[in-house]
Every structure is written in C-alpha cells, then in structure tokens.
Amino acid sequence: MPEGDSVFRAAAQLHAALAGKELLATDFRVPRFATLKLGGWTVEEVVPRGKHLLMRVAGPRPQDRLTIHSHLKMEGTWQVYPPGGRWRKPGFTARCVLRTATADAVGFSLGVLEVVPTAEEDSVVGHLGPDLLGPDWDLAEAEKRLLAAPDVPIGVALLDQRNLAGIGNIYRCEACFLSKVHPAAPVSAVPDLAAMIMDAKVMLGANLGPGRRVTILNARGMPVGRSEGRPPYWVYGRERQPCLKCRTPIRRGVLAKATGTEERDIYFCPTCQPPPEGT
Ligand SMILES: [Zn+2]
C-alpha cells in the first residue's frame, strides 16, 4: 500500500510531464477500457486524492471531460519516459500507456484503472475522508470521523481512508509511536487524537521532495537522518533494533483485519507503547 506522499510525488511528476499536452495515443490494457482511445484529447491536470491519482483530460467538445482514475495498491507505479524510451518494467505489467510529443507515461501493475466522466469523480473518490495533503484538509472532520467508531483500534482506523486519506502502514506505525499509543489501542484511548493526526500530516508533508522517506524530524519539522547509516524511521521496519527513545527492542506484530483495510505488520516499542490489556 503506498503512502500518500508517494502518490503526491507521482502526481507532481505526471503533471509536470503531461499537463497541457495533447495525447497522441493512448492504450488502456484493461478489458473494460481496451477500446477507448483518447488520442487528440488534452491532459488538463494530474492531481492526487489520498492515494488515488486523477488525470483529467479534455476532449474536442467542451462537454468532453474524462478522468483517468488509478490506484497504485501494492505494486503499482507510474513512470515517465522520453518518447519511445525503453521501459524499466516488463511490458506485460503495463496497464496504461499515454503518449505525447514529449513524454510517454506508463502505469504498471496498477491496482485500479478506470475512466470516468470528470463530473462523476465522486463515484470513485467521494468516500474518502479529508486528504492530509489536499486542499480539502479538515482536521476537525478527520477527528470526528475517527471518533465515530471509538472502539476500533487506532492502527486500523488510521489506515481506513474513509476517515482521513493518505496514511499507509509506515505513517500509521510512526504516528502511534510518537503519541506513545499501541496500534491495537482503541481510538477512544488516544490521549490527543488531533496531535496524532497532525504528527502524521507533518511527517507526510516533510517527504514530498526528492530523497528517501524519513519520519525523524527536527524541531522545525525538517527530516534528519536522510544520510545513509541513520535509521529513517522511529519504529517501522526496525524489529529487534533498540527504540530510539528508550532502547527497548522494537517489536513487530499484526493487527486484525478490518473492513476496507489489509492486514499489515505493525511495529511498536513495548515500553513506550504498552499493549492494551487483553492483547
Ligand atoms: Zn521505547
């Protein structure tokens, strides 16, 4: 599952390569849209919405407005090549090819690829909660949605994109650590939910530029430890390594699968984030 920052960066790269450009040829390699051809249409913009990518294209008539909607899921990626450039991924994994005079954009192993009228975008992203990296960001609304199911484990609730959009497994583990809350603890047990959400937002926001992802930030919210040899994360992927605050070995576990989420590993410090009773 991608994190919102990956999708944000992918959208920025695609927007830079495609916005304002006329499509010379398109190839949708999914059965439902295999016969759709958008040659002659113009890419207006590429925007992220949570973990979803929306490419808005305009056709020859004013009423022709379509949105190419994709979701990367686990393995998906969009890559931009010079026209006719050699792909770095196997051709059989390509799901969408968009050709312009200056660039080819290719979507590989996309978890979702569909084309909808732009006026009906809500049918594919309308369920999303406030986007941590989006213009619609609304902290109070995100908090309200999380608190609407107070008994759900916070680690599950943070991944549920209907509550707030953009958090993947890395940021949910890191946000729980910073709040000293075990991911299995219920939403209602988080002492300062707004602070936890804002920690996630600040970490995501610090990773919109180039370079590897780092969640360890200084007081000004700037990443530290982007250099090699320093851990990029507080807990994520650090099983058995010492907690950076108390030296206790970090543990890995699994949270129960919940509706709309995938079962993913959690990482936590058993001292800083004591597991709730009964787990
Ligand atoms: Zn610790």
Image: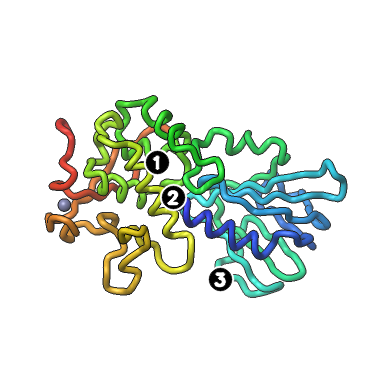
Whether residues under marks 2 and 1 lie with C-beta atoms below 8 angstroms apart, the answer is yes
Residue on which the image places disc 1? 159
Which residue is found at the position 25% from the left and 35% from the top? 191
Q: Residues within 10 Å of mark 3 (few under 14, many from 20)?
A: few
Q: x%, y% of residue 105?
A: 65, 63
Mark-to-mark CA distance, 3 and 1: 30 Å
**Amino acid type, callout 2:** Met
Mark-to-mark CA distance, 2 and 1: 10 Å
Q: Earlier in the sequence, mark 3 or mark 2?
A: 2
Observer-side mark, 3 or 1, equals 1
Residue on which the image places disc 2? 1
| Badge number at residue 88 | 3
Please tell me whether mark 3 sits on a helix, a strand or a loop. Answer: loop
In the rendered image, the vertical position of residue 212 relative to residue 146, given as above or below: below
Q: x%, y% of residue 114?
A: 65, 45
**Amino acid type, callout 3:** Arg
